[in-house]
Amino acid sequence: MMYNALIEDCFFQPKHVGSIDLSLPLAVHSRKGNTNSNIIDLYMQCNDKGFIERICFKSNGNPYIIAGLEWLCRQLTASFLPDLVLPDYQLLVEKLEIPTNQYPVALQIEGVFKEALVLMKKKLRGIGHECGNATCG
Amino acid sequence: MAVKPIYFDYMATTPVDPRVVEQMINYLGPEGCFGNAASSTHQYGKDASSAVEQARRQIAEVVNASSQEIIFTSGATEANNLALLGAAHFYNNKGNHLITVTTEHKAVLDTMSQLEKEGFEVTYLSPEADGLIDLKKLEQALRSDTILVSIMQVNNEIGVIQDIEAIGLLLANKGVIFHVDAAQSAGKISIDLATLAVDLMSFSAHKNYGPKGIGALYVRQRPRIRLQAQSFGGGHEYGLRSGTLATHQIVGMGMAFALSADEREIEQNRILKYRQQLWDGIKHLRGIRLNGHEQQRIAGNLNVSFAGLDGDSLLLALSELAISTMSACSSASIQPSYVLREIGLSDDLAQSSIRLSIGRFTQEMQIGQAIDIICTQVGRLQELSPL
């Protein structure tokens, strides 16, 4: 299998691997994947101003999954949730040159980020942050 | 230029030994011995024919056979085809049942499948969890109409060595032809066809530091085993395999086999030591499992699984090493190795398996490098894993 330079960089130099203590007030976790393979755990932590302070993942998936998670984490770190537009799976397909038979992987990655953002939005709404409005996420 | 990965895929193919290359060149150019071995009317043809016969003798000597029992083919795949199709077609009036093992190379399994389409019946024996076959199961599978049993000596994925001596003894005097695919064993294990009860044996040059595109089939003469030819057009190779002989490749195969016989004992001891160093260096890793019998395996083979890791990620992480996963790509997905599934591995575990194979040009320093790379990268992937 041949992978492009972005995949190789994200796969071999990931800076967003790990987990976040979910007892923290603005921390969320989302999991996608079934059985024992291609599992994704995504963790996100915001500050009370609505900025993503930390985002990280764990996965036993293939190189497209690991690189896709790392690349999206890089894009989203320090983002302000009210302004955030989540890159969709098509951008992932393009950036990582994901082959047709691996498209479900891109959808899986998009799905786990969407879920984490929805969870975070709920948390922020709970503390009365403006991110609870319709423009966010 | 990018640094090439360290080669650990000697069971896929070997580089041609430089001494063999040097010899082969003499049979190509206008100054060399380029004649057609069938052109007996002039010196060019006679020289080529003499070189072919010399190579035939070299190969025969390595396996203690007579040179008339060696038929050149394009490789072990063609040798397997000729052995199975040729024997099944010739002895069809005697019976139509054949026996093989589910972990054979596709060159045997696909040929068996073709014979089934033609009306033959095939029994596929499953190996035990260590990859070896139970002789009792083979004995029970034999029928009055069984005409042939085909079992490889060394498995190309997990490297286990079947006891072909015992299998031969079991089949002796039963009127059943015994074919052995020796593509992975010739040159690495001592083979004595004067004492083994083997009727047909397939050989490959490129697994044994010879060139690609050449192989041979041993066909026993006493008692004589008959085959129906599968290709026509000139009656070469005693009428069994028509086509102009590739002198340079045949010379290369002959020399490669002769070299392996000279160096086998020392070389295999060195390779075994390297394999043991490699296994000792990685066997502590979490979730690792050795596939195939630990002792009854070829010196250069190490096939291991890493539970919980994705096969593609493993392969990319270990890209500094030229290794094999044995998975097969189809249009929609990666199919795990059928051999590993046959010895009881789950699809997930089979997909997280790698084969490292060590050979003549592996250096001790490379074993240390491989241990470092595997330990670092497997540890990194395990840190990435949520399990």
Image (spheres, rainbow, N blue to C red):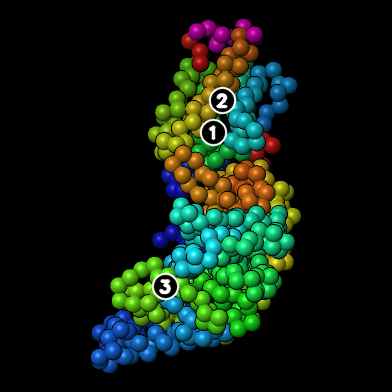
Query: In the current view of this chain or complex, which residue is farthest to the front?
Result: B93
Q: Residues at marks 3 and 2, common chain?
A: no
| Side (left or right) of B234 relative to A33 | left
| Side (left or right) of A137 relative to B128 | left
Q: Which mark is residue A69?
A: 1
Residue A88 coordinates in the image, percent (x, y)? 45, 25
Range of residues picked out in magenta: A126-134
Query: Which dot, 3 or 1, sits closer to the camera?
Result: 3
Q: Secondary structure at mark 3?
A: strand
Count of numbered badges drawn on the protein: 3
Residue B92 coordinates in the image, percent (x, y)? 49, 64
Q: Residue at x 53, y 7 (%)?
A: A133
Q: Mark 2 or mark 1, which is nearer the start of the sequence? A: 1
Image position of B384 with respect to B41: above or below: above
Q: Residue at x 34, y 74 (%)?
A: B242
For disc 2, the chain is A
Estimate how packed mark 1 is, as few (under 14), some (14 to 19) or many (20 or more) residues with alpha carbons within 10 Å.
Answer: many
The quarter of the picture where the N terminus of chain B appears is bottom left
Q: Secondary structure at mark 2?
A: helix
Residue B140 coordinates in the image, percent (x, y)? 69, 59
Disc 3 residue type? Thr
Q: Which quarter of the figure has residue B182?
A: bottom right
Query: Which dot, 3 or 2, sits closer to the camera?
Result: 3
Q: Which one is nearer the viewer's eye here, B338 or B237? A: B237
Q: Are marks 1 and 2 in contact (CB under 8 Å)?
A: yes
Disc 2 residue type? Val
- Disc 3 and disc 1: Cα gap in Å? 51 Å
Q: Which residue is mark 2?
A: A112
Whether the magenta-drawn stretch holds residue B249 is answered as: no
